[in-house]
Image (cartoon, rainbow, N blue to C red):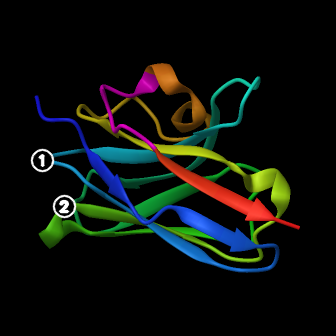
Amino acid sequence: QVQPVESGGGSVQAGGSLRLSCTAERYTYMGWFRQAPGDEREGVAAIYTRADGTSSGTYYADSVKGRFTISQDKAKRTVYLEMNSLKPEDTAIYSCAAGLSAPLFYGSNLMNPSAYDLWGQGTQVTVSS
């Protein structure tokens, strides 16, 4: 299996924006996670395609709702994380993860790292005050 590949990290001032991209060989659902030094890995957002194959759903951590948007371009096998109104506490290494088989349901389980099969190497996001 080929690991997903992230891009788009960098440094920005508080209030700024960044867009992360993650390209995977294949996925059924994709999640973004972040980990700051000394902290546990935290689920940020996830996106999945419903069983009918024609619509998608998303899930967000409360800490990023209204500021971050996850989207996908299935033709490019790429998932994006648009991050707006960034805060210093958003500083972390951001990793994308691919889930290969559809779970029984889509919900808060998408914020659990154990739900995913393949992980990217991570990209640093730094927000200065």
Decide: marks 1, 2 in contact (CB < 8 A)?
yes
Other residues around mark 2 within 10 Å, as few (<14) / some (14–19) / many (≥20): some
Which structural element holds mark 2? loop
In the picture, the disc for residue 25 is 1
Name the residue type under label 2.
Arg
Instruction: Using the image as rendered, state which of residue 36 and residue 22 is in the foreground.
Output: 36
What is the x, y in percent for residue 125? 60, 56
Of the numbered discs 1 and 2, the one sitting upstream in the chain is 1
Q: Which residue is mark 2?
A: 77
Figure check: 13 above or below 11: below
- Decide which of 18, 98 is in the foreground and name it: 18
Closer to the camera, 70 or 105?
70
Picture quadrant where residue 78 is located: bottom left
Task: State which quadrant residue 37 falls in.
Answer: top right
* Residue occupying image coordinates x 46% and y 35%: 105
Q: Position of residue 50 (x, y in %)?
A: 33, 55
Distance from Cα at disc 1 to Cα at disc 2 = 7 Å
Q: Is residue 55 magenta?
A: no
Pick whichever, 34 or 51, lies toward us.
34
Residue sitting at x 51%, y 58%: 58
Residue at disc 1, secondary structure: loop
Question: In this picture, which residue range is highlighted in magenta?
Answer: 115-122
Judge whether residue 14 can be spotted in this image.
yes
| Mark 1: amino acid | Glu
Circle 1 Cα neighbour tier, 10 Å, few/some/many (<14 / 14–19 / ≥20):
few
The residue lying furthest to the right in this view is 129
Q: Position of residue 44 (x, y in %)?
A: 62, 48
Say which mark, if any, is on residue 5. Answer: none
Q: Quadrant of the C terminus?
A: bottom right
In the picture, measured across the screen, residue 117 lies left or right of residue 92, that is: left
Q: Residue visible at 38% across and 28% down?
A: 116
Dividing the picture into quadrants, the one containing residue 85 is: bottom right
